[in-house]
Image (spheres, rainbow, N blue to C red):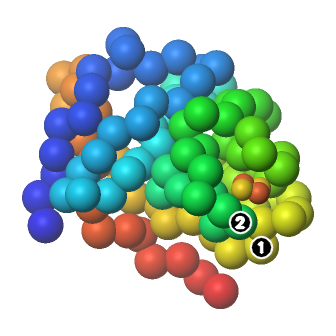
């Protein structure tokens, strides 16, 4: 599957996630404190909540509903009540544009 341009890198700020939809999948695009761009499934695994409406902090994306924090690099929840990871999608940057593939990176158990 090919990558889809979702935004420019300049649109991203370290304090907020950007919700995009790629091939029908809601995805939260986040830039971390070092400037690396990440793409995670936008739906919390604890409930039907958009993670992009939550908080970006310490290289995690926090669900506003009950506070689970998902690691940007792996999608794994670092705090309960969520215990299942969100998918992580491949990101490429080309000339300042952010491209995301809708096929998740496989995750280790
Ligand atoms: S819905 Fe996200 S932690 Fe409960």
- Foreground disc of the pair 2, 1: 2
* Residue furthest left in the image: 2
In front of the other: 18 or 39: 18
Residue 59 position in % (x across, y down): 70, 38
Residue sitting at 20 percent across and 32 percent down? 94
- Give residue 80's quadrant in the image: bottom right
**Do labels 2 and 1 touch, CB within 8 Å?**
yes
Label 1 near ligand 1 (CB < 8 Å): no
Drawn side of residue 11 relative to residue 63, left or right: left
Q: Residue furthest right?
A: 80
Q: Is residue 90 left or right of residue 5?
A: right
Q: What residue is drawn where x is 64% and y is 20%?
A: 15
**Picture coordinates of residue 56 (x, y %)?**
68, 31
Residue occupying image coordinates x 27% and y 21%: 8
Q: Identify the residue position indicated by label 1 in the image.
A: 83
Q: Secondary structure at mark 1?
A: loop
Residue at which label 2 appears: 46
Q: Quadrant of the N terminus?
A: bottom left
Q: Is mark 2 within 8 Å of ligand 1?
A: yes
Question: In the depicted view, which residue is nearer to us: 73 or 47?
Answer: 47
Residue 36 in view here: no
Q: Decide if residue 101 is on the left or right side of residue 3.
A: right
Q: Residue at x 41, y 69 (%)?
A: 105
């Amino acid at each position: 599957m090919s990558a889809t341009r979702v935004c420019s890198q300049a649109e991203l700020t370290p304090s907020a996630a950007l919700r995009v939809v790629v091939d029908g999948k809601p995805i939260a695009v986040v830039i971390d404190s070092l400037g690396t761009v990440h793409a995670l499934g936008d739906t919390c695994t604890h409930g039907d909540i958009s993670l992009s409406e939550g908080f970006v902090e310490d290289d995690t994306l926090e669900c506003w509903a009950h506070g689970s924090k998902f690691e940007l690099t792996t999608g794994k929840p670092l705090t309960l009540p969520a215990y299942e990871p969100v998918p992580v999608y491949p990101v490429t940057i080309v000339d300042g544009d952010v491209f995301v593939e809708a096929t998740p990176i496989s995750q280790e158990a």
